Image (cartoon, helix red, strand yellow):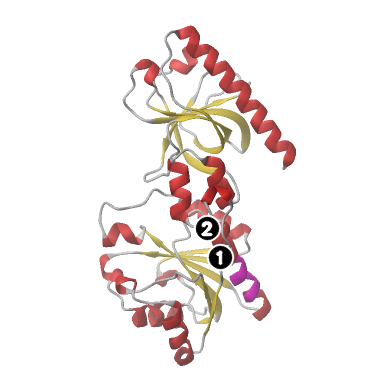
């Protein structure tokens, strides 16, 4: 899959293509419907499929300080899109100047002159251009002038976890923030992931017999609510069942919120300085301060037992 940052990186001899545009944070099941349709239509026509996305998130430029928590960084989104069969991903730097482009100018500059769009595929709520004034109807209207077609894909609605709301990144972020990682996974089609470099912490887990990887997460990461979770820690290509703690470590009066993962039944792991991923499978319990160290150790042992059982059951079903 080709990856371009900015219009100038698109090959000069790029021909017609099927294009879809959006932030696509998380590449959730709704996104997968749209992107999958773009890939299928491109193959039907014998042309490449292109996903256009933005960095930073447009809201950060339009309303500084309002950057939403991210469900997936751009490199992860590109990996997920590649798995769906996308031929190229174009990341457009979203600047104040770019935000001023009218819908018509956006169509001409990006879709017509740069990507030579033959078909544009979007969801029903797609908006583009200055003040998000462009709609799918307007996109289709100009398609008659610039020789491209527009297809709008209806999004399925989520199940009980989403209360019947359409699949959306906003809903997924809300579920993650509430600690409902199972509900988020229902929308994403996979467990929610955070990633970052393992850094040295207070090393209390090591002292207690449960050494954890203290993950310095990427900026703007959507981190689940404080609590203990079952999931996986992956490093150097190895995926390990884990008990994951998110919070400030109230047992020791901590103040800094951290994500720490204990790789179950693994001894002697040295992950310092490595880039790792943490996948959240299920909520186990809330964060608590225990009356004694013995009480804490009993709780941790139970956390590990439950996390082991949950990950084993998941792997058996998948």
Residue displayed at 47% across by 72% down: 10
Which quadrant of the figure contains the N terminus?
A: bottom right
Q: Secondary structure at mark 1?
A: loop
Comes first in the chain, label 2 or label 1 = 1
| Residues under numbered marks 2 and 1 in contact, where contact means CB atoms less than 8 Å apart | yes
The residue identified by callout 2 is 167
Rendered position, 284 above or below 17: above
Q: Secondary structure at mark 2?
A: loop
- Nearest the viewer among 255 and 2 is 255
Rendered position, 219 above or below 4: above
Residue 31, image x, y percentages: 54, 61
Which quadrant of the figure contains the C terminus?
A: top right
Span highlighted in magenta in the image: 34-41
Residue 45 is labelled as none
Query: Could you say which quadrant of the image residue 222 lies in?
Result: top left
Residue 174, image x, y percentages: 43, 47
Residue 42, image x, y percentages: 62, 75
- Furthest-right residue in this view: 316
């Amino acid at each position: 899959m080709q990856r371009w940052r900015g219009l100038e990186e698109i090959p000069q001899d790029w021909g017609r293509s099927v294009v879809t545009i959006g932030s696509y944070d998380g590449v959730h099941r709704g996104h997968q419907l749209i992107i999958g349709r773009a890939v299928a239509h491109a193959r039907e026509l014998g042309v490449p499929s292109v996903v256009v996305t933005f960095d930073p998130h447009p809201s950060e430029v339009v309303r500084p300080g309002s950057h939403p928590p991210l469900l997936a960084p751009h490199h992860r989104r590109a990996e997920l899109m590649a798995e769906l069969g996308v031929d190229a991903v174009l990341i457009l730097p979203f600047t104040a100047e770019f935000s001023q482009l009218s819908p018509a100018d956006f169509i001409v500059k990006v879709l017509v002159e740069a990507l030579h769009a033959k078909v544009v595929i979007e969801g029903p709520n797609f908006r583009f251009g200055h003040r998000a004034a462009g709609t799918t109807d307007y996109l289709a209207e100009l398609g008659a002038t610039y020789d491209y077609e527009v297809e709008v894909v209806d999004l399925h609605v989520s199940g009980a976890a989403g209360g019947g709301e359409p699949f959306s990144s906003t809903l997924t972020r809300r579920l993650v923030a509430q600690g409902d990682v199972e509900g988020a996974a229902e929308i994403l089609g996979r467990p929610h992931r955070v990633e970052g470099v393992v850094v040295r912490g207070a090393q209390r887990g090591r002292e207690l017999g449960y050494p954890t990887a203290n993950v310095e997460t990427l900026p703007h990461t959507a981190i689940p609510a404080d609590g203990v979770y079952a999931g996986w820690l992956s490093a150097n290509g190895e995926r390990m069942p884990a008990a994951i703690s998110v919070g400030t470590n109230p047992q020791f009066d901590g103040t800094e919120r951290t994500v720490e993962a204990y790789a179950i039944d693994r001894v002697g792991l040295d992950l310092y300085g490595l880039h790792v991923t943490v996948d959240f499978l299920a909520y186990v319990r809330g964060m608590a301060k225990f009356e004694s160290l013995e009480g804490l150790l009993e709780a941790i042992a139970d956390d590990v037992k439950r996390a082991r059982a949950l990950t084993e059951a998941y792997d058996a079903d998948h």
